[in-house]
Image: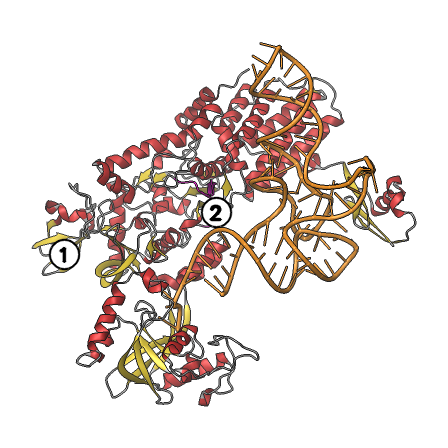
Amino acid sequence: MEYDVAAVEAKWQDLWEREKVFYTTEDTQRPKYYNLQMYPYPSGDLHMGHLRNYTYVDLLTRYRRMQGYNVLSPMGWDSFGLPAENAAIATGIHPREFTERQIVRMKSQLRRLGAVYDWSRELACHTPEYYKWDQWLFLKLYEQGLAYKSRSAVNWCEQDQTVLANEQVVNGACERCNSPVTRRDLSQWHFRITEYADRLLEDLEGLDWPERVKTMQENWIGRSEGCDFKIQVADGEGEFEVYTTRPDTIYGMTFAVLAPEHPLVEKLVAGTDYEESIRAYVERVSAASELERMSTGEKSGIFIGRHCVNPVNGKRAPLYIADYVLMGYGTGAIMGVPGEDQRDWDFATQRGLEIIRTVEPPAGFEGEAYTGEGVSINSEFLDGLPTPAAKRRIIGWLEKRGIGRRAVKYRLHDWLVSRQRYWGCPIPMVNCDSCGLVPVPEEDLPVIHPDVEDYRPKGQSPLALATDWVEVDCPRCGAPGRRETDTMDTFVDSSWYFLRYCDSHNSERIFDDDKVNYWMAVDQYIGGVEHAVLHLLYARFITKVLYDMGYSPAEEPFTRLFTQGMLVKDGAKMSKSKGNVVTPEPYYERYGADAIRLYELFIGPPTDDAVWIDGGVEGTARFLDRVWRLGMGEVGSLADREENRQDKAILGVTHRALRKVTSDIDRFHFNTVVSTLMALINEVIAYLRGGGQTATFREVYRLLLLMLGPLAPHVAHELWERLGYGGILATQEWPVWDEETAREETVVMVLQVNGKVRDRVEVPADIDEATAEQHALRSHRMQRWLEGGKVTRVIVRAPRIVNVVVK
RNA sequence: GCCCGGGUGGCGGAAUGGGCAGACGCGCUGGACUUAAAAUCCAGUGUCCCUCGUGACGUGUGGGUUCAAGUCCCACCCCGGGCACCA
């Protein structure tokens, strides 16, 4: 009997969808399981790299369902963003039309893989139905003071003609197009994520996430503890504040540095001989890209003709500006302590500035700056104190005099959310000459995204071209106003979509309380490690904001996170831009979805990158072929007879396989799940060749199909039906192994002499130590190695191993 | 530079509360079936040896602990990722 791949797969895909087998509603009788994959950008064609992830998610959906969970597995589209806009610029097709076409294509490809979802919950963030709630969310943040507009130096991508969040700048280049990022002074919308920095940091602890993702978030938030204190400019010309984590080294300050953009700089140099050169320096530095600023080995910077006074001893120190001091971190000014800071050391030695050590380096220390802890020296009243005590002492001293205080700083900046692009969610604000910034009233949402003629970026949002749309009356006073024309970062869309899936089509509220209470938090979240800081940090932030406002029952959105590896081909990540994609179509035609799925699972540990090998699918296709022939009675022979040892043995093998498959799925070791089933079928074939018993085989095969169901659902469903086990496989209960049946009666025990294997014997699994030792000493193969020596010890680990130590 | 991962056959990978290294698969070699091929099935497949023995060696390198080390400890090399003038 031939297996008609195309017909069988289409039949079951049709049935799962028509019968809404994986559609779900709240059901308090069963435990819920929210299984979610990071929703994709609808890029159109799926390649083998994508299919790997979809296979993992689908496997879990089906497996948890069989285990009796009420599984929520939704799908939707991260459908705003640059690709559609770029395609529109290139082809003239409207981004909406382009996007919706891609969605249709992707849905059909997911269906072809046999991936199942509750499609009734489908959402797409480019639809007004969805982005209305982005806007609502924006207004809520604005009400709470968590969204604000401010002028500041921002990252600007020349290529994309838009601002970027810090997280989108990688090594001084745009993470998307890799072109250099420059600084621009612009008025932009921000979300006050820094207000949540401590909670975002602390709550990481309770999450069942990969350690490295947690570490990346920790580093990104970059909390540091130290102290702010004031420094007077000599001759009463003002003061500035510095931040340091090492206030104990204050006696080692031999200079101070302000960031070039520091507001005090202009005042200090106005009308002096230095004015000209300082202005030139500041201009040069701010025009340079981040990349250029970092790549110079020398520390650039110049003296500004002023001195400042060290508050602890009144010592004068020259004042510099240098671009290694960043306006965006701390106070934008530092004390220069070359003895204990390597950057200050470099700066000082390049200019011949004084260096004073204020911490005793360990004996034999050969480095330049000593940045470790130790005992204070050359520090008057701090001398002799170890670093932590010296810190406490000096902070107390500064506090008492009202010039300093303990301070905590973060590397994390507020989230810059406005973008000068077309294909994104409009920001629901109006600028009014008399009222200023006025929020669009909630009842006027959504602010519908207008059509325009020209999508090309020109430094301002293309929405500004839609004059009819831009010109609007002020919602407060009715005078003519202008809409905000920037759109939101698409990471806003993706920071709450998992909540919306609980109630995708609610037009009254962002989502219903009872529904999110039932489903949240996401039990298993699956996606790429590239989102470790971007999406995953923003989503945690927005969830916490919604929690604080009483909308989300969960303070953390994703209880458990799994980050899968990439698929590699020809030494590079499989991607359209690298031109190394393997398209699934030929494999569907030749081997079918099940064989592809199995190979995707088998290819290697899910956490690791895996190399695509063309011949690999053939192996899993052969395996499925054997499963089929076994089911069709084309292998070995069966008879109705009394149960014998072979029957008991194969049942034992099957139950042990079931035990391992269950625990390996739970541990996300999908590759060994497949190899376990392959080994099982090899055993079953050997069993049938020896003549099987009908009832035993039927039971073994039933368990095999149940285990195969989540992995290779089409062929498993078809066989389940043909062999008449009853019902639809997908809704059967996941079997539980029987320990008694799984127990092995005999095992092969290894006999060693001095740690080297010299013999193997089959023994009862419950053999006692004395008997095991007798086996070792009496084995005639062992005699050769025992002769002429003296047995000094016998180590017995029954029933696995006996090691005889001979001298 | 700092912080995480990771180095096992020709290839992807199994095996870590220390206990048979190389499961399972790919590839390759030989054989069966066939007029032939494909498919399928069977056997073999870490390295070494005129000694073919349940022989010696073997999990990046060098030491160590142990009856026993891929697994534990110390030092180092290489690869991948993250962070990186963050004061």
Q: Which dot marks residue A562? A: 2
Q: Tell me, yes or no, whether the highlighted magenta stretch contains residue A642.
A: no
Q: Which dot marks residue A708? A: none
> Quick check: A795 above or below A750?
below
Of the numbered discs 1 and 2, the one sitting upstream in the chain is: 1
Quarter of the image with the N terminus of chain A is: top right
Q: Relative to A327, is B66 on the left or the right?
A: right
Identify the colour scheme used.
secondary structure
Q: Amino acid at mark 1?
A: Asn
> Quick check: A785 above or below A692?
below
> Quick check: A16 above or below A181?
above
Q: Which residues are magenta?
A: A559-575
Nearest the viewer among A209 and A284 is A284
Q: Which residue is mark 1?
A: A431
Q: Residue A428 location, x and y as percent? A: 20, 51
**Number of marks present in the image shown:** 2
Q: Relative to A54, is A99 on the left or the right?
A: left
- Residue extending farthest right: A788
Nearest the viewer among A126 and A611 is A611
Q: Is residue A807 visible?
A: yes
Q: Amino acid at mark 2?
A: Phe
> Element type at marker 1?
strand
Q: Residue at x 26, y 50 (%)?
A: A159
Q: Relative to A400, is A214 on the left or the right?
A: right
Quarter of the image with the C terminus of chain A is: bottom right
For label 1, count other residues whose C-alpha is less than 10 Å away and answer few (under 14), some (14-19) or many (20+). Answer: many
Q: Chain of mark 1?
A: A
Q: Residue A722 location, x and y as percent? A: 54, 19
